[in-house]
Image: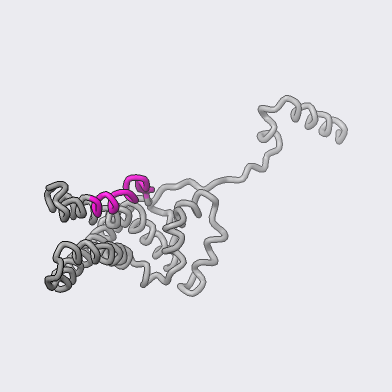
Amino acid sequence: MTGADWRSGLDHLAPKQAELLLGTSLSRRFVSLPMWLNHPANVAGFYGILIAMALLLPYRVSYGDAIWWPTWIFHASLLIAACMLLGFASLIIARFSKRPPVAPPRTVLYAMPFVGLTVLGANITELLTLPAALVWFLLLLPGPLYVHLSWAPRWRMLCRLEDGLDPFEDVGIEPVETETDMEAIVEEDDDLKDVLDTILSEEE
């Protein structure tokens, strides 16, 4: 299977395999992108860009009329670089561990950046005085953690599919077998058993 038509192979996967390979709605959006673009480092870096954009207003407010944008550019660059490095590290770990993707706790991850921005705003307005490390932890963790748990292992499997290899070889998922034995299907249903026995007796 070539890189140009590897997505056509998704139609031939069993339901459990397709669900594991494609993931939920967020992962399916990344799957629709070219493989070079949805690299785990790029996905993590994109999260860093989103957080950096969200920091524009807090930095503007915190510095008042002073020149604030050089500091914002510096911190945004560090944030994006850190996210991309964590994405690379997650991919390396996924290649060695060969573990399947795991759905992250979305309720917690989705709320953490907003909590981090709230804590940052409280620090700026001096309503609270909390460690800056806590703010950066809340802002930085969700994106790289999603990449580590879900996207990096999934991207490794997609690369195997693109190379014409079995993406589930090291994952250990069992393919779904379709039951074709009528007697096995109706084994636990007495009414269906009676109907089956009637049909078989008439054929004899």
Of residues 64 and 95, the one nearer the viewer is 64
Q: Is residue 120 above or below residue 63?
A: above
Image coordinates of residue 93 in percent, x first then y, are 26, 56
Of residues 123 and 140, the one nearer the viewer is 123
Residue 103 among magenta residues: yes
The residue positioned 86% from the left and 36% from the top of the image is: 203
The residue positioned 19% from the left and 69% from the top of the image is: 77
Q: Quadrant of residue 95?
A: bottom left
Query: Is residue 40 shown to the viewer in this render?
Result: no
How many marks on residues? 0
Image coordinates of residue 106 in percent, x first then y, are 37, 48
Q: How is the image coloured?
A: one colour
Image coordinates of residue 112 in percent, x first then y, are 28, 49
Of residues 65 and 96, the one nearer the viewer is 65
The magenta segment: 102-118
Q: Main secondary structure of the magenta part?
A: helix
Of residues 110 and 37, the one nearer the viewer is 110
Q: Quadrant of residue 152?
A: bottom left
Image coordinates of residue 74 in percent, x first then y, are 15, 70
Residue 109 among magenta residues: yes
- Check the picture and name the quadrant holding the C terminus: top right
Residue 114 lies left or right of residue 157; in this view the side is: left
The residue positioned 19% from the left and 51% from the top of the image is: 122
Farthest residue to the front: give it. 65
Query: Is residue 75 shown to the viewer in this render?
Result: yes
The residue positioned 72% from the left and 25% from the top of the image is: 190
Farthest residue to the top: give it. 190
Residue 13 lies left or right of residue 75; in this view the side is: right
Q: Is residue 24 above or below residue 54?
A: above
Q: Quadrant of residue 186?
A: top right
